[in-house]
Amino acid sequence: MVVVRPENPHQARLLRLLRDDGPRSRAELGDAVDLARSRLAGELDRLIERGLVENAGPAASRGGRRSPLLRVAGSVRFVGVTVAPDRIDLALTDGELGVLSRAGEPTDVRSGPEAVVARVVELIGKLRAEAGVDRLTGVGVGLSAPVAFAEGMPVSPPALPGWHRFPVREALAAELGCPVLVDNDANVMALGEKHAGTGRAFEDFLYVKLGSAIGCGLVLDGAVYRGATSGAGDIAHLRLAEDGPPCGCGDNGCVEAYCGDAALVREATAAARSGRSGPLADRLAEAGGLTVTDVARAATGGDASAQALVRAAARRLGQTLVGLVSFFNPGIVIIGGVAPGIGPVLLAEIRGVVYRRSAPLATGNMPIVLSDLDDRAGVVGAARLVSDHLFTPA
């Protein structure tokens, strides 16, 4: 495996500037870094020689002869992958992490890590063939699981049964012949927000991921904070009540047992069977089961029972965020993975709890918003993950 990386911190910084801000002239890059003109020219020439940077046409004139724009080389190609309990998604990106093409499909992670990883490799091969990409620069992966980041493997993941300590990073790297990094999906989505979403304007923020598996990514000083053993942000199994509903982790009363998709479906099914919700009862009779999409449709359609259970879940999540906000003091809280339609109801309830119960100094002008990246946060963030690694000196 041949990996071409910057040779020193100056080259790494120049590469990241071009990745994050797009094509720049030598003069603009000189304005952004503290390097003598001759040293800057030498570092850029070395990046061009190594195939990491290329010319991108003439820059706007500053008077006199126009210098060429520089950009991350067109041969730099990343793939971002996310693996959820019921779905895999992939994106092929350029060196600036712009999405060039995407693929995805439903999956069942209970089929085992070998089968899912093999399918990921097949889908990556399909994206490469369609785009005519001979060599990948790197692949980033986000898993709905606690991940030992240094080892690239999930650890006791409730949402991925049978995946404990499976070497995802090594398995993919062996098949693809390029560097691979693996992280928790909430961390990866936080990176996606930092690169291309609302989080771009903030150095310190929380990204809360809802859905079938709940998680939280913490961004400190512009970088994901993982903690001593990569366990930071694992809020799904914080206990809210001793006698609460059972959780997939085997405990009771966890945040996920109250606020996850399965919890919403459980409460919606109870409401349908008890006669408290006519729309949900009709849907249950028609389909034989309910999904979180059914709950969202009922809530947005005005069903009071569906709205009430969404608000109840949001209050529980808000209670969790009160502690996080008071401890972490983020500049913004971004919430992703919300089922279409229920965002306004969910957000209003969360804001009410957090702003009412948190210390004024902690909340201040802190916004709580929904992610505007939809499902792109994960795949873009996964590509950002591996590019951060490769755009660092070896």
Image: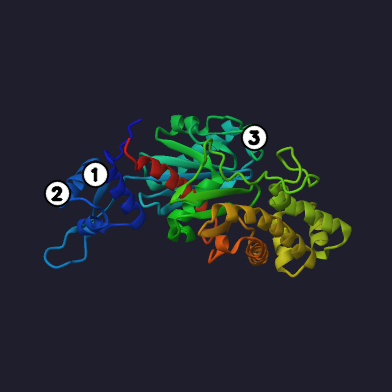
- For the point 43% across and 47% down, which residue is it? 384
Give how far across and how far down residue 102 sits, in percent: 48, 50
Considering every residue shown, the one lying at the far left of the view is: 64
Mark 3, residue position: 111
Where's the C terminus, which quadrant? Answer: top left
Left or right: residue 190 compared with residue 161: left
N-term mark: 3 or 1: 1
Mark 2, residue position: 38
Q: Look at the numbered discs 2 and 3 and tell me whether their residues touch, using CB distance below 8 Å.
A: no
Judge by depth and name the residue closer to the eye, 125 or 317. Answer: 317
- For the point 27% across and 56% down, which residue is it? 32
Disc ID at residue 353: none
Type of amino acid at the residue the image marks with label 2: Ser
Considering every residue shown, the one lying at the far right of the view is: 274
Q: Crowding at label 1, few (<14), some or many (≥20) Cα neighbours within 10 Å?
A: many
N-term mark: 2 or 3: 2
Give how far across and how far down residue 335 sits, in percent: 58, 57
- For the point 40% across and 51% down, which residue is it? 97
Q: Secondary structure at mark 1?
A: helix
Answer yes or no: is residue 74 visible: no
Alpha carbon distance from label 3 to label 1: 44 Å
Type of amino acid at the residue the image marks with label 1: Leu
Give how far across and how far down residue 233 sits, in percent: 57, 46
Give how far across and how far down residue 280 sits, in percent: 79, 60
Left or right: residue 68 compared with residue 273: left
Mark 1, residue position: 47
Type of amino acid at the residue the image marks with label 3: Ser
Q: Secondary structure at mark 3?
A: helix
Q: Is residue 356 above or below residue 129?
A: below
